Amino acid sequence: MSHVLPTLTKKIEVDTIIRDTLDEVLVLRFGRATETLCLQLDHILSKAAREVSKFATVALVDVDSEEIQVYIKYFDITLIPSTVFFFNAHHMKMDYGTADHTKWVGSFYTKQDFIDVVETIFRGAMKGKLIVKCPLPPERVPKYQILYKDV
Amino acid sequence: MEEQHDSENARVGTTKQKKKAEYEFCKACNINHNQGLRHKYFPNHKKSLSTFLSRFRNKLSDVRFFLNAPIPLDSQLASRNRIWCVFCDQDIEEHSSSFACANAIRHLSSAEHVKNLKHFFWKYGAAADQLDAFMVSDDDVAKWEKRCVARKDEASEGCRGKVFGPSSDDIHNQVHSGNVDSLENVYSHSVKSYPSNAVLPLQCYTNESQISCSGLSGVANVATSSEASSAAIPFALQDFAGMLFMFIGNVSFYSLRLSSSCLPLLIPISSGHTESAGGNLHSGAPPPWVEATEVVQIYSKPVLGDPVSHSNKLGKSKKLNPKRVGAAWAEKRKIEMEKKKRGETVRNEYDANWLPNFGRVWQSGSRRESRKEFEREKQKLNVETQSEMPIKIQPYVSKRMVSFILWVLKIAGLVSFKTFSQNQLALS
């Protein structure tokens, strides 16, 4: 599925796509194209990318790449696949009801879930909000646990 | 009293009007205005000034080409080889010169031109760092003159009958390179004008089978983009095809023979030019337009949310909420990207360590702080690794142990008595 969407493997590529995506939501999927869950998410992203193309850009980031490690650390990515949202080079948070508001961890249940999330982020961002509430019911958000830093 | 006051006011008004009424012509905007010196700070003026300068810069790029590679000028072409200097308002003719753009090069390096140029830059408020682009330094002129002399010697050494040969070749080369340039221009225009943002995923769907062949995705993309642009700009593509034929006709050996039989007007060129380009059709090298478009694609790929195409796509100039997230940043970036498109230098280039604002998981406070925190962490890590590096951790070996090992080795006859006793002395 990774050949349908642009796959970024260099830091400079990630930098430019963050900087040059203006007035649109940028969806960055951090993951490995060989993992099952990642494949499922990629499938949903590739199907939905065209439908959200008026207000969002989707790109995949390969976590195994050497140059991307700085972003893995910076974005505190411990579980893959993780999806991070940006708007005008600003990080967009969302209150999913899970511990981590900074990124979506795991896959989506349906394509419509993804579209809803991106649309909510876009609408919030256009109103100047840096954090929005997740439009999905809690049972449709994948559950996970994160540990405080190194503890 | 009041009347007096009124009359004073009226006088002041008239003097103001008089001051304002002094119209002058702005070369960059091509308008008469009565705004005085403040006109140069207006955004419209700045925009038209940058296009004005970039247009002249394009013209000067030809002159720069001849500065690096002096080419003898044919007397028939001399009347066509002239340039209008926008700073000095004069036409530079080449009637008397034996090399192409000789007078232009001399004019660009002259003190008068530099003076006019500086006055123009002051009057119209252009950036001083662009001054060098519009003049030629004395060193370059000296180098150019040396090259000219060398070229003349070459020409005089060659036999008389052949003198015309190389010059016509050169002119043909020049025409040919012009073709290639314009070809690339046309192509890049067509690629740029194609709204890549909206249709890109679709394009990928329709070509899924092609793209899935590894490594061919670039070529496939090129093909689709050219197809798409054919719908939009048929004329440009026709031109492109025509030039393509010209180009291939010039480059390839077989069609050269063909062209000489069919089109006697085409003059064969020396193959040195094509060899320097690295391979041709028959050696399996990728065609130059593929490389050119790849560069364009790499450049245009990140411009997914291209502001211009975005607004075109919407069809109407939709006002975005000025309070939206990162509005100021978006405006700034748009201006930068437009400047980059026009080929101007952008002041604040981003370095390799650039990071976006990001609110980290365990972070409270502003998002800029989280970047600072991350950088602090990274520095700490660097310092730790650096301090660890020089210290080599070795297991402790007692002196008695060393002497015992040496003694064992001595018994085995591996170490001579001399070294053994030296070690003993050192230990004691």
Image (cartoon, coloured by chain):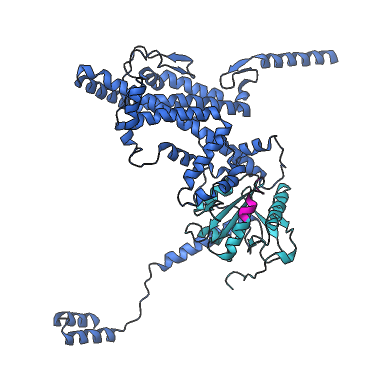
* Residue B135 visible to an observer of this rendering: no
Is B225 left or right of B358, judged from the image as shown?
Answer: left
Q: Residue at x 56, y 26 (%)?
A: B49
Q: Residue A16 at what x, y percent from top left?
A: 54, 47
A82 or A101: nearer the viewer: A82
Colour-to-chain, cyan: A
Residue B347, compared with residue A93, is above or below; it is above
* Residue A115 location (% of width, % of height): 69, 54
Residue that appears at 27% across and 25% down: B146
Quadrant of residue B13 in the image? top right
Q: Is B110 left or right of B143, judged from the image as shown?
A: right
User: Could you tell me if residue B49 is visible in this image?
Assistant: yes
Magenta-tinted stretch: A45-54
Q: Quadrant of the C terminus of chain B?
A: bottom left
Q: x%, y% of residue B300?
A: 53, 41
- Horizontally, residue A57 falls left or right of residue B278, namely right
Q: Position of residue B391 (x, y in %)?
A: 38, 70
Q: What residue is at 59 percent from the left and 69 percent from the top?
A: A149
Which of the 4 quarters of the picture holds residue B77?
top left
- Palette colour of chain B: blue
* Quarter containing the N terminus of chain B: top right
